[in-house]
Image (cartoon, rainbow, N blue to C red):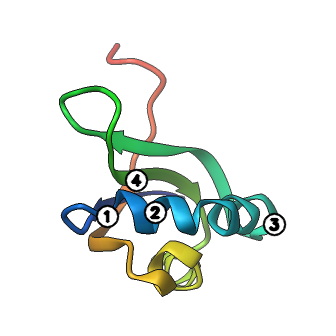
């Protein structure tokens, strides 16, 4: 099953995000939960990171919750909100 994880940072959280960026990337590279695609959400200036989006492949929502809870960004308090939803992945709209 696929899951979307949508995270928004605390206001002005870029410094905290950058301070934990290497640990976050290392965590994703070694996690047992498969990341299909992920990346930072950007502000309207197309540069400032304001959150994260993940498309994960996992056996259950509980696995995704545990995956997110162990992320260094979660532990450092980078994200203000985290929403996790099952996702029906489709290639196109046909």
Residue under numbered circle 4: 52
Look at the numbered discs 3 and 4 and tell me whether their residues touch, using CB distance below 8 Å.
no
Task: Give the quadrant of the N terminus.
Answer: bottom right
Residue under numbered circle 1: 13
Q: Which of disc 2 and disc 4 is earlier in sequence?
A: 2
The front one of 49 and 38 is: 49
The front one of 22 and 38 is: 22
Left or right of residue 77, residue 38 in this image: right
Q: Which of disc 4 and disc 3 is earlier in sequence?
A: 3
Residue at x-position 33% and y-position 71%: 79
Look at the numbered discs 1 and 3 and tell me whether their residues touch, using CB distance below 8 Å.
no
Mark 2 is surrounded, within 10 Å at the Cα level, by few (under 14), some (14 to 19) or many (20 or more) other residues, namely many
Secondary structure under tag 3 reads helix
Q: Which of disc 3 and disc 1 is earlier in sequence?
A: 1
Q: Which mark is residue 71?
A: none
Look at the numbered discs 2 and 3 and tell me whether their residues touch, using CB distance below 8 Å.
no
Look at the numbered discs 4 and 2 and tell me whether their residues touch, using CB distance below 8 Å.
no
Secondary structure under tag 4 reads strand
The mark tally for this picture is 4
Residue under numbered circle 2: 17
Say if 83 sits above or below 42 in the image.
below
């Amino acid at each position: 099953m696929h899951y979307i994880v949508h995270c928004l940072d605390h206001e002005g959280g870029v410094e905290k995000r950058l301070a934990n960026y290497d640990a976050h990337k290392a965590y994703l590279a070694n996690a047992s939960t498969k990341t299909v695609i992920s990346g930072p959400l950007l502000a309207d200036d197309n540069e400032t990171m304001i959150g994260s989006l993940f498309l994960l492949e996992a056996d259950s929502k509980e696995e995704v919750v545990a995956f997110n809870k162990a992320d260094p960004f979660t532990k450092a308090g980078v994200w203000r909100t985290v929403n996790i939803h099952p996702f029906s992945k489709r290639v196109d709209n046909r």
